[in-house]
Amino acid sequence: MTGKRARKLVEIFILILALYLANQRALVWGNLFPDTTNWYSSAWIGSALWVVVLAGLLWVLAQTASLRSYVQQWRANFLLVVFLYLAVLSIVWSIYPAVSIYRAICVLGASLVGAYLGFRYPLEGLLRILFWFGVVLVILSFELALLVPVGGRMLWEPYNGAWRGIYWHRNHLGSLTALLSAVFLIRFVTGGQRRQKTVLWDGLFYVLSAVLIVLSDSATGKIILLVTSASVLVAAAWCRVAHRLRRKHYAVLLILIAIAGLIAFSNLNLILGLFNRDTSLTGRLPMWRFLLEEVVSRRPGLGYGFGAIWSSGAFRAQAQDAAGWGFPVLIADNGFLDILLHLGVTGLLVVFLLFAALIVRAIRFALADRTVSAFFPLIFLEFALLSNTSFSLLIESEEFVWLVFVALLFLTHQKVSGRSVQERNSPSQPGTA
């Protein structure tokens, strides 16, 4: 076996293992709150596997003489370093230090792998990885829901048979599948433009992902599907006519968007009613009020420790009583509120700054490349903001979304190792085969 082939096999292995670990706690056969009191528990086994992933990652970087360049790219993402430092340091003030240690290992591992993906692969390569991840997710979710309904569906009130596929909750399946549907659609559009044979597979899995979202009965998933699909089509149209547009056209477009936004806001109950929801967000507002007034207010600066507070069964019961729900409360159902609980205002501010940095980079990236694919980072941001408004997909229930977020932070940086965006997307770069 040649050295190049060995490196490729190791890289494939560590990526598959990392993607599994990043989703592990959210899987239907996983555990959202793994035991950290025993060294042989799933939490510490998972932590050991993250160490295996990182060891493999270091080996690949060393074999390709890329370690120094990889480390240098972290300097352009110092805010990410600050966030990770806070997550690790929170062990000091955490109400459950062992839980914070475990969760810090998970987010650190996901961040290092995400950074590697953004450093190593051009956008087309990242989309290819997400495509295959989506294919596996869709196929396994259909099989589980159809063949083992008790595992793949939520057969109790108030969910009434909604599909959850391989995940613990229908909202997780719906939201994440909506992101992957955007990947399928982007590849379908670009594949059609290039007359690629794979376009039929992209179209098929886009349809299957849409069906899966409908069967999940996730309002968030349906909304994200509509928004991201529309965004892909708008991006495709813009790429075709951008050279003809002038400032006056953009001014008119902004006015129309503002008017549409006002109309939508004034008819919010009607719009949410189309998805069988209301402005209370299915009872989330009372719980959020309780968390902000009774919990966050006691430790506003640095929070309760990374990932710690929801591991307490007593606290989950208290939150359930405050929300008046007839079913367990396991997360805040808002990714940003969960970060506020874990790392306080300090951690949330860093996350907002990271989002702002990615917004700026994503816009520059799209304008520099002017292809439909180049709009994926912006579409991902739409997904991240919408999904974390009514569910917690930003580190709380898994690390996959965070991994992709970090990958895009690195990938969209204008220059990586002295190369421009256009050079990174050239066919000669690694990961494009």
Image (cartoon, rainbow, N blue to C red):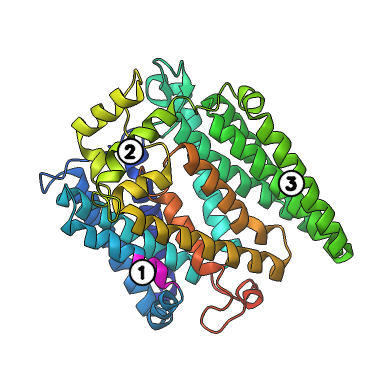
Q: Name the residue under label 1.
A: 81
Q: Is residue 259 left or right of residue 134?
A: right
* Residue 192 in sight from this viewpoint: no
Span of residues in magenta:
77-82
**Which amino acid lies under the numbered mark 3 shown in the image of this protein?**
Ala
Tell me if residue 80 is in the magenta stretch. yes
Give 201 or 3, whichever is nearer the viewer.
201
Q: Where is residue 345 in the image (x, y as percent from the top left)?
A: 35, 55
Q: Mark 3 points at which residue?
A: 258
Residue 10: name its quadrant: bottom left
Q: Mark 2 points at which residue?
A: 293
Marks 3 and 2, how far apart in space? 33 Å
Q: Which secondary structure dominates the residues rendered in magenta?
A: helix
**Which amino acid lies under the numbered mark 1 shown in the image of this protein?**
Val
Marks 2 and 1, how far apart in space? 30 Å
* N-term-proximal mark, 2 vs 1: 1
10 Å crowding of disc 2: few (<14), some (14-19), many (20+): few
